[in-house]
């Protein structure tokens, strides 16, 4: 039966896939026709134009098709891109706009770059002459122009991500490859951006301000520079401005070559050859690349607005600037003062670096200028004494490197060109970690006979950089943001005066930082970790000030280098976030009982009435108390019950918005304990106060524990007694708290589906859905609780912050236990 069903399903899936493809092609008629033209014109291109140089205008129109000398794989990739990216853009722009932007963007970029390349071809600069001879674009400019224009019509996060990715790609290609087609793509992107702005209007600013976005652009630019430098190291066919980086790495000089130079050349040539051999060894290459690794370690700090990362970037780029200037002067000297040793070293003056060699000097200057210009984007200062500790760490790294250099040199002294002393090894180490000192030193560097000798001389110089990388990563990724400076106003006083919803009292728990508004009338509790300011629940603010308070907190968080994330907020706060264009995702459902006329009558309350009646028959009573007023014997039993409950779980007890025994020790938190005639505790619940306008208007359930083998329906009994007691007291509301990952909100989409699947998978471990079903015995109304983030891309950061908040001390052993439990439950 099963096999026959599968046989029938396979053709149906095939027909559905074919139908989807046909519909996709129909939605992009211009792109489909364009793809057909590419197919028809391939043979024509091969025979007619082959590789049309950028300086030849006659090929402008036929360059709408790929060049003839392309492989079938490249040709197939072009067709797929046209049918994928092209149709995606056409669906958003409309066929007419898509065709106009594509033709104008492609043709205008080719014309402009052709005219410029022809003008530059007559200059004495070698790069310009080579640039004029490089091949032009095919369909790339068309796709870049239309794709970027279509991205301008999408939502903010998609638009920014597309522009950033395209920007990084073009920055790398223009600075590395430097061919005509890359500049054509750059012009096409400019045309696409202008078209998208005209059609879609100006790009709205992010609600939390432009600081985070500006930092992202700076970080993206630095990443592009690093990527371009790394790619250019070994790409011999690149001709772009940064391609000259390879001149620092490409030569490889053997000891035999050095001996030949020293035997046949002058003393100066011998010294140049020895210096050049040290600069082209593997250790030297790694040492030259270490500053890029350090810069990568600063990037998370730059994105979070850390002042230490900005200072580190400026100092590091100044070091790279000095090193590049010295390298440019040295390499230029090798080509300028040419002698017979050049042939032995394998250097060709005909392909010297020329003006390109000075581009690596301009790049760090630009980075320094941008960071200093935007210094206000990095206001987050490190803790007191951090710079002093940093200096001590770096100095220790330098000393440790010297020790390693001396030890390696003495251990492998037989592989060096001369027998070293400790002082000679120390000096050799110093002149190789201080830029330019080697050129001024009266004593030349040590030489090595083989790879072991070069390893001995280079290993020590890598140690200080490794220490800096470790310290930098620790500085920009660790640390918790403390409470705001305006904590003179007690947060609990604000909470009592204006309230923070039914879950507001949990914001007073330990491990929460507190932010107080500038007016002192509102506050927000949050966790500052993982690059996020994760709120605990709704802000403690009046309804009239809610929007302004959320906006003020968001801006403060961004100044601290954190992404503001509002977690477990109700509809009012979520509506404010939506009005800003933020993304809101349902993460839990709260069950609330409105007091006043609750009567446990009817079939719906059958289980509740049964629990109350059984408790009366078995002599179980409910008693109100606080942790402080509870007898010691009662406390001991509660702790024992809670500990036994936690031991049955595959993971440690969760915190953050789920209280434990520690949260019971609060004079404003009420305990409702079920005890029998022998004072045996069968179950316990805790109830947090709900404040509004300075008065307690309700209670919220938090802590629930029952004794194994005790009175079974104890929870139904305790909650029923709490409802009756609160109603008799005149309270208006009783919240049964929220059920994480359980939602009734109608929010279709991938994220909602993922949360639903996660809830189902975690059900055997935490029983969120079972808890939600249990609470419905009391016929409550439900309220959705939301997660609000500035954009969809921040959801990953939010998930990490929430998981760390709930389980901050999750060990490897706990993770293995969780995986085993989930695997076992999935098999069941």
Image (cartoon, rainbow, N blue to C red):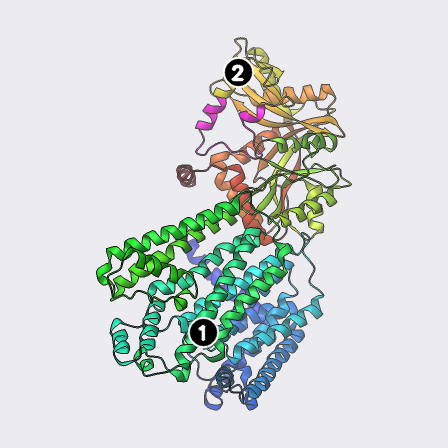
Marks 1/2: CA–CA distance = 84 Å
The answer to which of marks 1 and 2 sits earlier in the sequence is: 1
| Picture coordinates of residue 420, whole percent (x, y) | 26, 60
Q: Secondary structure at mark 1?
A: helix
Location of the C terminus (image quadrant): top left
Residue 329, numbered label: 1
Residue drawn at 59 percent across, 17 percent down: 628
**Is 657 colored magenta in this rendering?**
yes
Spot the residue most to the top.
677
Residue drawn at 48 percent across, 54 percent down: 297
Name above or below for residue 523 compared with residue 795: above
Spot the residue most to the left.
414
| Picture coordinates of residue 688, whole percent (x, y) | 64, 26
| Picture coordinates of residue 226, whole percent (x, y) | 48, 64
| Residue receiving disc 2 | 681
One can see residue 60 in this view: no
Pick whichever, 132 or 306, lies toward us.
Answer: 306
What range of the chain is rendered magenta? 641-664
Pick whichever, 145 or 227, lies toward us.
Answer: 227
Occupied quadrant, residue 433: bottom left
- 551 left or right of 467? right
Foreground label between 1 and 2: 1
Residue drawn at 50 percent across, 59 percent down: 316
| Picture coordinates of residue 547, whole percent (x, y) | 73, 45
Residue 223, numbered label: none
- 299 left or right of 485? left
Pick whichever, 543 or 769, lies toward us.
Answer: 543
Mark 2 Cα within 10 Å, few/some/many (few <14, many 20+)? many
**Is 780 colored magenta in this rendering?**
no
């Amino acid at each position: 039966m099963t096999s026959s069903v599968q046989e029938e399903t396979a053709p149906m899936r095939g027909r559905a896939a074919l139908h989807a493809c046909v519909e996709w092609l129909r939605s992009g008629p211009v792109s489909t026709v364009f793809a057909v033209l590419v197919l028809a014109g391939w043979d024509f291109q091969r025979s007619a134009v082959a590789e049309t140089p950028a300086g030849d205008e006659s090929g402008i129109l036929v360059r709408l098709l790929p060049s003839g000398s392309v492989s079938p794989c490249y040709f197939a990739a072009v067709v797929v891109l046209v049918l994928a990216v092209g149709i995606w853009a056409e669906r958003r722009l409309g066929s007419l706009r898509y065709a106009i932007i594509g033709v104008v963007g492609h043709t205008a970029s080719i014309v402009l770059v052709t005219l410029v390349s022809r003008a530059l071809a007559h200059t004495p600069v070698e790069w310009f002459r080579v640039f004029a001879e490089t091949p032009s674009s095919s369909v790339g400019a068309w796709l870049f122009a239309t794709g970027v224009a279509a991205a301008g019509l999408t939502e903010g996060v998609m638009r920014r991500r597309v522009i950033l990715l395209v920007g990084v790609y073009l920055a790398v290609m223009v600075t590395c490859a430097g061919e005509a087609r890359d500049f054509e793509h750059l012009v096409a992107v400019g045309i696409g951006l202008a078209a998208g702005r005209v059609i879609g209007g100006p790009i709205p600013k992010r609600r939390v301000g432009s600081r985070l976005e500006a930092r992202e652009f700076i970080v993206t630019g630095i990443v592009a520079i690093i990527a371009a430098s790394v790619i250019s190291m070994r790409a011999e066919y690149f001709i772009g401005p940064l391609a000259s980086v390879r001149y620092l790495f490409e030569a490889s000089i053997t000891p035999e070559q050095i001996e030949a130079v020293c035997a046949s050349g002058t003393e100066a040539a011998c010294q140049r050859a020895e210096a050049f051999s040290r600069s082209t060894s593997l250790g030297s290459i790694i040492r030259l690349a270490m500053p890029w690794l350090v810069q990568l370690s600063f990037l998370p700090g730059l994105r979070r607005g850390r002042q230490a990362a900005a200072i580190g970037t400026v100092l590091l780029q100044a070091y790279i600037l000095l090193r590049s200037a010295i390298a440019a002067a040295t390499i230029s000297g090798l080509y300028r003062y040419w002698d017979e040793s050049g042939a032995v070293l394998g250097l060709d003056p005909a392909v010297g670096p020329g003006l390109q060699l000075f581009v690596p000097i301009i790049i760090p200057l630009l980075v320094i200028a941008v960071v200093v210009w935007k210094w206000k984007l990095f206001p987050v200062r490190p803790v007191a004494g951090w710079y002093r500790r940093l200096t001590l760490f770096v100095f220790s790294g330098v000393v440790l490197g010297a020790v390693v250099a001396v030890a390696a040199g003495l251990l492998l002294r037989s592989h060096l060109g001369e027998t070293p002393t400790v002082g000679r090894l120390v000096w050799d180490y110093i002149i190789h970690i201080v830029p330019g000192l080697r050129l001024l030193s009266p004593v030349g560097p040590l030489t090595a006979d083989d790879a072991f000798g070069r390893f001995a001389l280079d290993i020590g110089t890598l140690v200080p950089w490794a220490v800096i990388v470790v310290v930098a990563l620790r500085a920009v990724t660790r640390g918790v943001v403390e409470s705001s400076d305006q904590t003179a106003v007690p947060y609990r006083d604000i909470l009592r005066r204006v309230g923070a919803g039914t879950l507001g009292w949990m914001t007073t728990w330990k491990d929460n930082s507190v932010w107080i508004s500038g007016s002192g009338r509102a506050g927000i509790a949050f966790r500052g970790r993982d690059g996020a300011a994760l709120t605990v629940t709704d802000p403690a603010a009046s309804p009239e000030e809610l929007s302004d308070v959320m906006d003020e907190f968001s801006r403060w968080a961004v100044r601290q280098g954190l992404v503001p994330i509002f977690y477990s907020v109700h509809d009012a706060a979520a509506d404010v976030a939506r009005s800003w264009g933020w993304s809101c995702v349902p993460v839990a459902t709260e069950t609330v009982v409105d007091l006043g006329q609750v009567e446990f009558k009817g079939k719906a309350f059958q289980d509740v009435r049964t629990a109350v009646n059984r408790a009366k028959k078995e002599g179980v009573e409910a008693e109100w108390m606080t942790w402080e007023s509870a007898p010691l014997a009662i406390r001991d039993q509660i702790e024992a019950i809670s500990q036994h409950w936690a031991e049955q779980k595959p993971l440690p007890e969760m915190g953050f918005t789920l209280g434990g025994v520690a949260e019971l020790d609060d004079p404003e938190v009420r305990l409702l304990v079920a005890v029998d005639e022998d004072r045996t505790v069968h179950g316990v619940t805790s109830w947090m106060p709900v404040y509004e306008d300075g008065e307690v208007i309700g209670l919220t359930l938090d802590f629930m524990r029952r004794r194994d083998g005790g009175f079974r329906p104890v929870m139904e009994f305790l909650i029923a007694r709490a409802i009756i007691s609160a109603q008799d007291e005149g309270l208006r509301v009783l919240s049964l708290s929220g059920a994480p990952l359980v939602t009734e909100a109608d929010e279709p989409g991938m994220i909602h589906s993922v949360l639903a699947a996660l809830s189902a998978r975690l059900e055997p471990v935490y029983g969120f859905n079972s808890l939600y079903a249990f609470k419905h015995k009391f016929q409550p109304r439900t309220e959705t609780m939301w997660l609000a983030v500035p954009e969809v891309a921040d959801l990953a950061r939010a998930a990490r912050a929430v998981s760390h908040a709930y389980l901050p001390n999750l060990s490897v052993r706990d993770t293995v236990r969780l995986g085993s439990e989930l695997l076992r439950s999935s098999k069941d």
